[in-house]
């Protein structure tokens, strides 16, 4: 068997054989949502080949069980490109997710806003992204499967369902374009002005590699940003990782409400 099939078998022994309906990957300061899953938590360290996560504010456990009556696999942490220089770091976890039965993936992240109407504590549903790094996790793939169309990378059906869930909860969920910068340093004011000119609405250090990998595997994907700060040069905020972690809970409660209502709609 492949490494992903072996790991999926190990996880089924610990978490049960019922297929997973949906996967979620949680961003900075949002890992608490994983603890709401009724099931088991498996440390990444127990799953050979899973990423090493060295960023504070993350929960490096795979939670498998039910949330709002839906069987889910929730990744409490991701490995960012800036940790090891490997944009493919999340490939094996996504292969395992697929091996567990999931066909859909919801990504979350903490992001900086480029728009005055997107303030800290707000949420943004990704309608598209700009891979400004030019890095691609499919570089080195030997098959023609590497030529992945990205026109509808952010699945229209999932986005519609998430917006409907937000509306039922009475929460705004505007759409926007997410820009991926590698990090770990934050962007300069000049870079932010450039990204605004290019059509960006928010900026962050994750998510885009996972969107590409998910589409490569045939998973449908959608993503939501929790806005934790105004991007560099757009306010007097002192941007830092500690600030990101401190501000993430402002949007996390709204995000959890939307995700729970979305899951209820799947039952």
Image: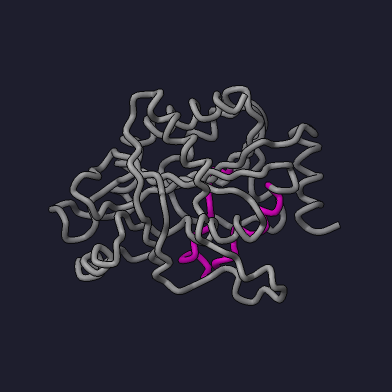
Magenta part of the protein: which range?
A: 75-97
Comparing 11 with 172, the one in front is 172
- Residue 167 belongs to the span the image colors magenta: no
Relative to 258, is 101 on the left or the right? right
Q: Position of residue 83 (x, y in %)?
A: 49, 64
Vertical placement of residue 99 versus 21, above or below? below
Quadrant containing the C terminus in the rendered view = top right
Q: Is residue 204 above or below residue 175?
A: below
Q: How is the image coloured?
A: one colour
Direction from residue 112 to residue 85 in the image, left or right: right
Up the image or down, 63 lies above or below 180; here it is above
Residue 27 x %, y % = 45, 47
The picture places residue 129, in percent across and down from the top left corner, at 41, 59
Residue at x 59% of width, y 39% of height: 74
| Residue positioned 46% across, 35% down in the render | 162
117, 75: nearer the viewer: 117
User: Which quarter of the image is occupied by the N terminus?
Assistant: bottom right
Question: In this figure, what is the number of numbered marks?
Answer: 0
Q: Nearer the viewer, residue 133 or 240?
A: 133
Q: Residue 2 location, x and y as percent?
A: 81, 59
Q: In the figure, residue 216 lies in which quadrant?
A: bottom right
Residue at 29 percent across and 53 percent down: it is 112
């Amino acid at each position: 068997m492949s490494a992903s099939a072996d790991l999926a078998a190990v996880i089924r022994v610990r978490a049960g054989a019922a297929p997973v309906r949906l996967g979620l990957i949680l961003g900075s300061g949002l890992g608490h949502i994983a603890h709401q899953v009724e099931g088991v938590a498996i440390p990444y360290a127990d799953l050979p080949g899973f990423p090493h996560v060295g960023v504070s504010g993350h929960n490096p456990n795979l939670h498998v069980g039910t949330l709002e009556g839906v069987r889910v696999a929730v990744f409490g942490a991701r490995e960012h490109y800036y940790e090891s220089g490997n944009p493919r770091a999340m490939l094996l976890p996504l292969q395992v997710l697929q091996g567990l039965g999931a066909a859909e993936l919801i990504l979350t992240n903490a992001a900086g806003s480029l728009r005055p109407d997107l303030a800290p504590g707000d949420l943004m549903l990704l309608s598209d992204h700009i891979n400004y790094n030019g890095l691609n996790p499919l570089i080195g793939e030997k098959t023609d499967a590497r030529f992945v169309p990205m026109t509808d990378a952010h699945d229209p059906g999932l986005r519609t369902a998430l917006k409907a869930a937000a509306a039922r909860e009475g929460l705004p969920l505007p759409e926007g374009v997410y820009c991926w910068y590698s990090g770990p340093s934050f962007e300069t004011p000049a870079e932010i002005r450039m990204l605004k000119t290019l059509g960006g609405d928010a900026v962050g250090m994750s998510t885009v590699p996972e969107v590409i990998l998910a589409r490569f595997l045939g998973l449908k994907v959608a993503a939501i940003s929790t806005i934790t700060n105004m991007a560099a040069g757009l306010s007097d905020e002192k941007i830092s990782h500690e600030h990101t972690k401190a501000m993430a809970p402002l949007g996390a409660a709204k995000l959890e409400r939307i995700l729970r209502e979305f899951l209820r709609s799947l039952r």
